[in-house]
Image (cartoon, rainbow, N blue to C red):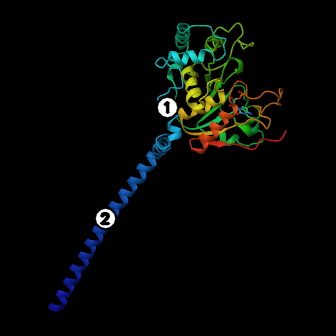
Amino acid sequence: MSNDNSYLQDLVHLSSARTETRIKMNSKGVYVLAVLLMVTITCVYFSDSLSKYILYASRAEDDHWFAQRFDKSVQPFLTEKNNVSKDAFDWWKQLQQLEKQSFDYYQRVVGSLLKTFPAISKGAERCRTCAVVGNSANLKDSHYGQLIDSHDVVIRMNMGPIKGYKEDVGAKTTHRLMYPESATDLDNMTHLVLTPFKIMDMVWLQKALTTGFQGKTYEPVRSTIQANKNLVRVLNPGFIAYVHQTWLRKQRGYPSAGILAVILALHMCEEVHVFGYGADNNGNWSHYWEKLKNPKLGTGLHYGNEEYDLIQMLAQHKKINFFKKPFPKS
Ligand code: C5P
């Protein structure tokens, strides 16, 4: 009987010891689970900034070719703080040989522009993903529209229309680069980004959005333009000089709106996707919305081949995604 009792006691003891172990193991398991849960929540919460960091970190430090060109300190947009240096101004001023005004005059024009549109000073906002849409006729039948619209920021330029071309070029525009000779009306949600190639372009912008611009540049230009005054930005002439000297490494000519848009996007966005670049089979910058009128159009005053090569290099170095369709046969 006493044996039975001690056996029973042993059994109870053993079972409570097992329960204790199980409880201990269970609480260990709960602890591990809680930690795992916390890690998961933290990862999900920070994944956006984490992926941004990874993309951003891969931008320069690990790539000699890119590091030699990409200068993080360059501010693409004109603000009160970052006016152009005298050297860059002198280079910029001779671009169209129309400009006879002095540096003092330039600074007065900029001062007046910033006063009329204080929003210019906000500079560049940062963005996650960006689509840059050039005006190449290779966008015809590309069906890129939906993909283009899926990006946070969509940069277009000059007269590139969206109405009637949604399937191939998308319908969203957050930024449009333009100069007086290529100006179009904008809706209330789109940033007007002036790419100034002369001081007169800044004078034009100020007047075209207020009292109206009278006169012409090297050709007749629009006297007024529709755009949200709070979303006006102006490319810093110093940024244009930087793209010319550091990215294109050229003595003559100057960067096109298209290559300026690509480098601007690199400075604003973590991920850059490029569409609609590439001359036609005869070397002309023909457009997706019109039949080529001038068979000797070429690429204007710009280094079309070099700009295209630069875009390809950026893609090879995985700094941008370059979407290119074969050029449609005409
Ligand atoms: O003709 P436009 O200057 O409006 O085109 C905007 C930009 O699109 C150009 O500056 C150029 O970079 C790009 N483009 C191109 N191939 C074309 C037409 C335009 O790469 N066939």
Disc number for residue 91: none
Q: As drawn, is 52 to the left or to the right of 278? A: left
Looking at the rendered image, the quarter that the C terminus falls into is top right
Query: The disc labelled 1 sits on which kind of residue?
Result: Asp
- Residue 238: x, y in percent? 54, 21
Seen in the picture, residue 25 relative to 292 is either above or below; the reply is: below
Tag 2 near tag 1, CB within 8 Å: no
Residue at figure coordinates x 66%, y 20% from the top left: 179
Image quadrant where residue 260 sits? top right
Q: As drawn, is 124 to the left or to the right of 323? A: left
Residue at figure coordinates x 43%, y 50% from the top left: 43
Looking at the rendered image, the quarter that the N terminus falls into is bottom left
Instruction: Compare residues 58 and 270 and report the one nearer the observer.
Output: 58
In the rendered image, which residue does mark 1 sit on?
A: 71
Q: Is residue 185 visible?
A: yes
Instruction: Compare residues 292 and 211 and report the one nearer the observer.
Output: 292
Q: Is residue 174 visible?
A: no
Tag 2, which secondary structure? Answer: helix
Query: Ligand 1: does it lie within 8 Å of the C-beta at label 2?
Result: no
Instruction: Compare residues 177 and 150 and report the one nearer the observer.
Output: 177
Instruction: Compare residues 62 and 251 and report the one nearer the observer.
Output: 251
Seen in the picture, residue 149 relative to 90 is either above or below; the reply is: below
- Residue 5: x, y in percent? 17, 87
Q: As drawn, is 158 to the left or to the right of 263? A: right
- Residue 149: x, y in percent? 65, 38
User: Which of the two discs, 2 and 1, labels the residue nearer the N terminus?
Assistant: 2
Q: Give the mark toward the camera: 2 or 1.
A: 1
Query: The disc labelled 2 sits on which kind of residue?
Result: Lys
In the rendered image, which residue does mark 2 sit on?
A: 28
